Amino acid sequence: MINHTRSEDASRLKSRMGSYAAPNPDKDVVRPPITDNSKSRAQMGFNHVQLGKMLCPAKYLADYIKDLHGMKSKFDSGSLKVTAALWPTYLYSGNIAGEDFDSEDILEGLFRGYLLERVRLFFIQLYRTTPIYTGY
C-alpha cells in the first residue's frame, strides 16, 4: 500500500514538473515541454536543455552555460563525474537555478532553490487533501 501511494504521489508531481522547473511559471514553462504521457526518458535529465542546467553541479554551471554540448559530453563520457558530493544547481537560490552559487561559501543559498520550494508546497497541498493522509 505504501509503495503504491508513493508511486501515485510521484506521478502527480511529474505532470506539474514543467511549470515547477520554470523560473517564472506564470510567464513560461519548460521547453521542450514535459508531458504526462511521455513514456520515453530520452529528453529528460541532461538531455533536456533546461533540466540539464538544473542538474549540473553548481561548480560547473558557468562552463555548462558557455558550452552545453561539450560539458554534456564530459558528463556522458565520465571524464567529469556527477556525484552526490557535487550539489546540483536546483538546490541553490537564484532566478536561474544556481545563479547565486558562491564557490567560496558553498552553503550560502543551499536548499533555497525555487524548485524545492514549489515541490514542498505541492506535497503540503497533496497531504492536506488526500484522504489516506488526512484519515477521512
Image (tube, rainbow, N blue to C red):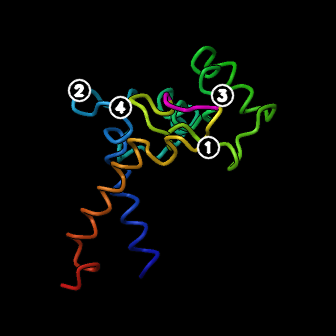
Identify residue for label 2. Answer: 27
Identify residue for label 3. Answer: 60
| Image position of 131 (left or right of 75) | left
Residue type at the position of mark 4? Pro
Please identify the residue farthest to the right as the structure is shown: 79
Q: Are marks 1 and 4 in contact (CB under 8 Å)?
A: no
Circle nearer the N terminus (3, 1) = 3
Q: Are marks 3 and 2 in contact (CB under 8 Å)?
A: no
Q: Which mark is residue 23?
A: 4
Quadrant housing the N terminus: bottom left
Please identify the residue farthest to the bottom as the structure is shown: 135
Residue type at the position of mark 2? Lys
* Start-end of magenta stretch: 99-103
Tell me the distance, in whole angstroms, between the alpha carbons under discs 3 and 2.
27 Å
* Front residue of 73 and 91: 91
Residue type at the position of mark 1? Trp
Mark 1: which secondary structure?
Answer: loop
Circle nearer the N terminus (1, 2) = 2
Position of residue 17 measured from the top left corner of the image (x, y, whole percent): 37, 44
Q: Which mark is residue 87?
A: 1
Q: Which mark is residue 56?
A: none
Q: Are marks 1 and 2 in contact (CB under 8 Å)?
A: no
Circle nearer the N terminus (1, 4) = 4
Tell me the distance, in whole angstroms, between the alpha carbons under discs 3 and 1.
10 Å
